[in-house]
Image: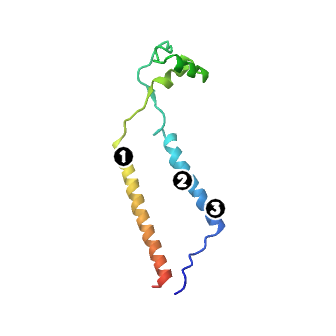
């Protein structure tokens, strides 16, 4: 029985594969941020008028670090008091479930096709 030799892939195809994977990775990481679906907190729950380090709940060491970074109580106000928004929508959840299931079945289908091709190449019809 002959030793199996997989089909060769050209350099241009390999480069295309790498570019597609990089674009998909960057897209998966940054598209939710661009769409406002992830990231830092969106709002300050209880704003403080005329903030000082004490009213913001910062001790001397914390305020010294903020000042070393160039913050004042006014500019650090939103940074310190912002809270994360833990709300979600049922539509987004159902869409994500549908995307995951579609991906699963797509991978199963492609795997079956490739498996049948390898078996056909190795053993014939």
Residue count near mark 3 (Cα–Cα under 10 Å), binned few <14, some 14–19, many ≥20: few
Which residue is pictured at 57% across the width and 22% down the height?
65
Q: What is the number of the mark on residue 108? A: none
Tell me whether circle 1 and circle 2 mark residues in contact (CB < 8 Å).
no
Task: Compute the Cα span from label 1 to label 2.
Answer: 21 Å
Circle nearer the viewer, 3 or 1: 3
Of residues 37 and 77, the one nearer the viewer is 77
Mark closer to the chain start, 1 or 2:
2
Image position, residue 24 (x, y; %): 54, 53
Image position, residue 13 (x, y; %): 62, 66
Mark closer to the chain start, 3 or 1:
3
Tell me whether circle 3 and circle 2 mark residues in contact (CB < 8 Å).
no
Residue count near mark 2 (Cα–Cα under 10 Å), binned few <14, some 14–19, many ≥20: few
Dividing the picture into quarters, in which one does residue 47 lie? top left
Image position, residue 14 (x, y; %): 62, 64
Task: Compute the Cα span from label 3 to label 1.
Answer: 35 Å
Identify the secondary structure beneath mark 3: helix
Residue furthest to the left in view is: 90
Residue count near mark 1 (Cα–Cα under 10 Å), binned few <14, some 14–19, many ≥20: few
Q: Judge whether 113 appears above or below 42 on screen.
A: below
Image position, residue 97 (x, y; %): 36, 52
Of residues 61 and 54, the one nearer the viewer is 61
Identify the secondary structure beneath mark 2: helix
Residue wearing tag 2: 24
Q: What is the number of the mark on residue 93? A: 1
Which residue is pictured at 60% across the width and 59% down the height?
18
Which residue is pictured at 48% across the width and 24% down the height?
80
Residue wearing tag 3: 15
């Amino acid at each position: 029985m002959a030793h199996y030799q997989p089909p060769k892939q050209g350099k241009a195809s390999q480069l295309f594969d790498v570019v597609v994977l990089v674009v998909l990775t960057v897209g998966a990481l940054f598209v939710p941020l661009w769409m406002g679906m992830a990231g830092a907190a969106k709002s300050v729950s209880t704003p403080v008028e005329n903030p000082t380090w004490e009213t913001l709940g910062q001790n001397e060491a914390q305020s010294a670090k903020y000042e070393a970074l160039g913050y004042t109580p006014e500019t650090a106000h939103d940074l310190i008091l912002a809270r994360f928004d833990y709300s979600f929508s049922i539509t987004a959840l159902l869409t994500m479930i549908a995307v995951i299931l579609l991906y699963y079945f797509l991978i199963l289908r492609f795997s079956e096709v490739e498996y049948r091709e390898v078996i056909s190449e190795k053993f014939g019809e």
